[in-house]
Image (tube, helix red, strand yellow):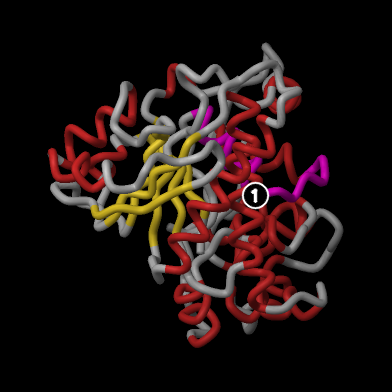
Amino acid sequence: MPLLIIQDDITRLEVDAIVNAANSSLLGGGGVDGAIHRAAGPKLLEECRTLNGCDTGDAKITSGYDLKAKYVIHTVGPVWHGGSMGEKELLTSCYVRSLSIAKERGLSSIAFPMISAGVYGYPFDQALDVAVDSIANFLDSCEDDMTVYLVIFSRRDYRVDGSLMTGVLDYMKSRYPDNRERVMLATGFKAMNMCLESDSAPVEDYVDSRIDESFTQMLLRKIDEKGMTDVECYKKANVDRKLFSKIRSNVNYHPRKRTALGFAVALKLSLEETEALLMKAGYALSDSNKGDLVVEYFITNGIWDINKINEVLFAMDQEIIGEY
């Protein structure tokens, strides 16, 4: 049940439901509201007329009509008045009510736009924090499988917390002194060398002592060592339950690098432990990979929130981690 930040046109997504950032009349408007009504066709407006509007922070559902999505969940976000008028609580309610309706209908996929971050004036970085936290908290408490997309229409408007971005950029600069040549490390060598630095045994001995443990076996061992349940782990890793079942049932499962990194964050592995887990899947962290450096920053600073990591990765046009 991952949370995925993507750039796309929400009206074109093939999901069970898309969320419309509507006004209180539910009779259409500008921005994403107008785009959804145009794409869905006139029957959407006809149904909306029967709903008698919607209060701020609440949500109501209609059919999707000409959209690829089966349903449209209309929610009314708050207008920004400086943050002292209950805006955060109302915006949180928009996400929770929409997700609750999706759960009640048994929907497995839902896509949100950035609610209130347009003409309603909610600062984008703060609106993003509310969106991610609200969705993540709902998914953590939800037993049903649900994939949630947070859809960004334009990267030009995308903003994350300034202090977080400053920390990441400073870390990246520290790894690239002006007089240092950027060299791509061969896959696996960095992880192997790191493990061997504290071990004088020959490489052959090192490999022989560990070759019997696959990625799956190491992952399951780490879950037990951390005292976590499978559900806790795959949720924190931003990984779908069905995929985790495949991994657990296949001792030789070969994950994508982004999946392995998701588990490393979920398990709160150190940088050295992360390298070891990646090596089991044939990967390594590279100083020449911007996305890897972002993940390194969070790990070395003990920040284990995968959604925050993915916010920064998306901002830097890098592949987000987890499985999707």
* Residue 89 vertical placement versus 206 (above, below): above
Residue 172 visible to an observer of this rendering: no
For the view shown, which residue lies furthest in the bottom direction? 249
Q: Which residue is mark 1?
A: 306
Quarter of the image where one finds residue 140: bottom right
Q: Secondary structure at mark 1?
A: helix
Residue 282 position, x and y percent, is 53, 62
Q: Is residue 303 magenta?
A: yes
Residue at (60% x, 37% y) in the render:
91
Residue type, label 1: Ile
Magenta: predominant secondary structure element?
Answer: helix
Q: Looking at the image, which is closer to me, 10 or 305?
A: 10
Front residue of 106 and 189: 106
Which residue is rendered at x = 28% and y = 47% of the image? Answer: 50
Residue 75 falls inside the magenta stretch: no
Residue at 75% of width from left, 52% of height from top? 194
| Image quadrant assignment for residue 294 | top right
Magenta stretch? Answer: 300-316
In this view, 191 is above or below 211? above
